[in-house]
Image (tube, rainbow, N blue to C red):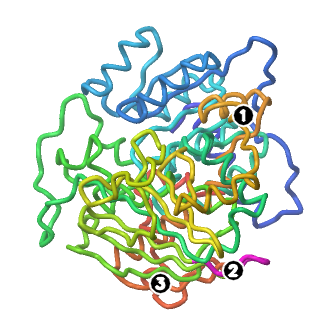
Amino acid sequence: MNKNSRRSFLKDAALLSAASAFPSIWVKGSPSGASNPRFFGPGDKVNLACVGIGNQGAWDILQMHKTGLANIVALCDTDMGAPHTLAILKEFPDVPRFQDFRKMFDKMSNQIDAVLIGTPDHSHFPITMMSLGLNKHVYVEKPMARTFNEVELMMKAARKHSKVVTQMGNQGHSEANYFQFKAWTEAGIIKDVKSITAHMNGGRRWHGWKTDLTTFPPKQEIPATLDWDIWHGVVKEHEYNKDFINGQWRCWFDFGMGALGDWGAHLIDTAHEFLDLGLPNEVSMLRADGHNKFFYPQASTILFRFPERGKMPACDITWYDGVNNLPPLPAGYVMQSADGTIPPPGGVVAKKETLRPGKIIYGSDLTFAGGSHGKTLSIVPADKEKDIASRLPVVPVSPSNHHANFLKACMGQEKTRSSFEVAGPLSQVFCLGVLSQMLNTTIKFDRKKKQITNNDLANQLLKGAEPRKGWEQYYKI
């Protein structure tokens, strides 16, 4: 840890920690060694470093590049020889390559404007914290982090480095559903919402696994191209098994956030923001098929209770996952087509084989149904939408997709729609839901103190396990 940027990061962390204890001595400004984000002139592009370059990360890289607003200046992944990383390396053969994000910053920090993070959930946190500490703009895939405390620290770091732009990668938050939900809420079409159903009933990677495990899967030989040590990041080291990597990480409590963390940001994001839901005061497991201490249930039903907010009534969100764990559907419900459109009356009614991820929002006088990501809402039954057609406001067209929105925000042209200020509390909702899943219990949460009041173990798990030795510095602000 003796390179310039890492030395600077550690020094900044110490200064910020001291500032918390002695705020009167702190002079606001750019931390030493970490320059402010640069000014962008006409024709400039954002110099983008990419950490996690396979699968979702690869897609994000191509989307960023497609905007024409970014220069891809660095590619970093713990496995540079895997098939899912080789594909993107061929797209950018001359871009510098790294296996350790810390070494990338050591060598190239002054050449990087922004960082795209498409790694597994458990490693979002340290990469984000180092990026923010060096005043780099950050686009991190959803969910923001794996523990409640990590998300809290990420929000605090973003506020501390206020000139840095942040965005969480829930792409639908820049598409039609975002603008429709905002317009319909402001016009009073969506109002007095007391109940929301969100469901993801597709098969998951861990479905069908034996749930009576007493240990993690057996040790296997580590691929020669994989840096298994760096892959763990802040999490305690596990013996290598193929079922920990390449998307399988999402299955395990130690590494991923399950179906809720994966799809929740695509289903309840607009309701969470425009209904000002914030954090729940109670989370309960209503169903946990195949519950065990290692990986996520085969099916989960989770009830989130949110209190009154100003003039808005208390609201419950009920989350359903699992192929056979179908939500109740309102009268007149007709399943959306794959493109998000609603078939005419008499269309295909949802059943377990065909029910796509979606949401149902129950207002005081209207019920709304919609799909995931940017798919728009429809009023059900359909004749009610015809009755109020003249009252429906014009919905603006998105000026930019999610990736362009981030890059334009880096250049000072737009404001990100899923900044840490917006996405942080949403991600913390998922963290609380995962705690309820992990312990298979009800937790009561003090929204003001941000503490669990009825379960000491759950309250300790808000912070999570102690970071692995050598990774403690990322938790210092």
The mark lying in front, picked from 3 and 2, is 2
Question: Residue beneath label 3, please?
Answer: 443
The three-letter code of the residue at mark 3 reads Ile
Image spot of residue 432 (x, y percent): 49, 71
Identity of the residue drawn at 43% across and 33% down? 57
The three-letter code of the residue at mark 1 reads Gly
The answer to if 311 sits in the magenta stretch is yes
Answer with mark 3 or mark 2, whichever residue precedes in sequence.
2
Q: CA distance from mark 3 to mark 2?
A: 21 Å
The mark lying in front, picked from 3 and 1, is 3
Identity of the residue drawn at 68% across and 64% down? 190
Question: Residue beneath label 2, please?
Answer: 313
- The quarter holding residue 422 reads bottom right
Question: Residue beneath label 1, please?
Answer: 33
Image spot of residue 319 (x, y percent): 43, 69
Label 3 Cα crowd, 10 Å radius (few <14 / some 14-19 / many 20+): many
The answer to if 226 sits in the magenta stretch is no
From the viewer's perspective, is 412 left or right of 266?
right
Image spot of residue 72 (x, y percent): 54, 18
Total numbered labels placed on residues in the image = 3
Label 2 Cα crowd, 10 Å radius (few <14 / some 14-19 / many 20+): some
Examine the rendering and report whether any part of residue 14 can be seen: no
The three-letter code of the residue at mark 2 reads Pro
State whether the magenta stretch is mostly helix, strand or loop.
loop
Answer with mark 3 or mark 1, whichever residue precedes in sequence.
1
From the viewer's perspective, is 224 left or right of 3?
left
Boundaries of the magenta span: 308-315
- The quarter holding residue 296 reads bottom left
Label 1 Cα crowd, 10 Å radius (few <14 / some 14-19 / many 20+): some
The one of 61 and 267 positioned closer to us in this rendering: 267
Identity of the residue drawn at 42% across and 41% down? 119
Image spot of residue 4 (x, y percent): 61, 31
